[in-house]
Structures are given as structure tokens and as C-alpha cells.
Amino acid sequence: MNKYLDHLSGLSMTLAGGGFLAASLILMLTGAAPPADPAWADASGVSFLEETVRLVRAAGWDIANVAVQVVGNRPVMAPRRAEAERVLSAVVGAPVSVSATSTDGLGFPGRTEGVAAVASALLTGNVALSR
């Protein structure tokens, strides 16, 4: 892995040390925040995502594909979009598409006070195992 998700254009990231894209995927896949366990205090977003993927699979689900959209004026995703897709796809074990849009100056993303990310995934598998 590389440091892409941990240090993107100097933007302060969510998850200790890491990656608003990974955070968006984790929240989407689990419906929950990352663990508060001190053992995870210095973990990267990629580490959290790897554990999330393991838990999803252990529950009997497979991740078929994922889409994540960054909403904000920065970081500018275009120059490193392919890299983000490659890194996230390798961690998830399925295709991950990354897109971006701005809010045309509206809200905290438009004022460059933060960034939002929206993610969705297609999960397949044994529904009986997930209950």
C-alpha cells in the first residue's frame, strides 16, 4: 500500500491517521463507526478497511463492487483517481469506482472547511449467515 489515503493534499482526514474514502466505505459496509479500542488508535484507514472487509466476509457476504463519491472543492481527485481506485479495489477485493463533485461553494465542503464522501456497495452472499 501507499500513503495516498493517509496524506491527501494536506487535508485533515477522519479515522486516526487515515483516509476519508476508507472511512466512507467502512461506515457504508457496517453501518457503524470504527472501533474505539485503543489498539486501533494509530491504525490507518486502510487497516480499518481491511478489518471491515474481513468482518463482512466472515458474516457470509461478498463485496461485488463499490462506488464512492467525494463531495468538496478539494482535494482535487482527478490526478490521483485511478490510484485511489486501484488501492481501494486491492483492499476490498472488488472493483471500487471513485468520483468527485463540488458543491459550488455551498456548505462546509464549498467553503473548503471539510469534505464529504458518499459510498454504496453491492453485497452478495448467503443471507441466512448474516442473520
Image (tube, rainbow, N blue to C red):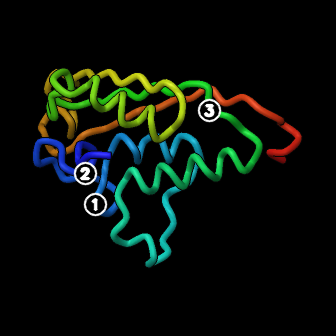
Query: In 3D space, how far apart are the residues under numbered discs 3 and 1 (Cα atoms)?
Result: 25 Å
Labelled pair 2, 3 in contact (Cβ < 8 Å):
no
Q: Earlier in the sequence, mark 3 or mark 1?
A: 1
Q: Tell me the element at label 3.
A: strand
Q: Earlier in the sequence, mark 2 or mark 1?
A: 2
Q: Which picture quadrant has residue 43?
A: bottom left
Crowdedness near tag 2: few (<14), some (14–19) or many (≥20) residues, C-alpha within 10 Å: many
Labelled pair 2, 1 in contact (Cβ < 8 Å):
yes
Residue beneath the point at 22% across and 24% down? 103
Circle 2: residue type = Asp
Q: Is residue 120 above or below residue 92?
A: above
Residue holding disc 1: 17
Residue holding disc 2: 6
Circle 3: residue type = Ile
Q: Is residue 46 above or below residue 104?
A: below
Circle 1: residue type = Gly
Residue beneath the point at 49% across and 24% down? 95
Residue 45 as seen in the image, left or right of residue 119: left
Residue 112 as seen in the image, left or right of residue 19: left
Give the numbered dot on residue 63: 3
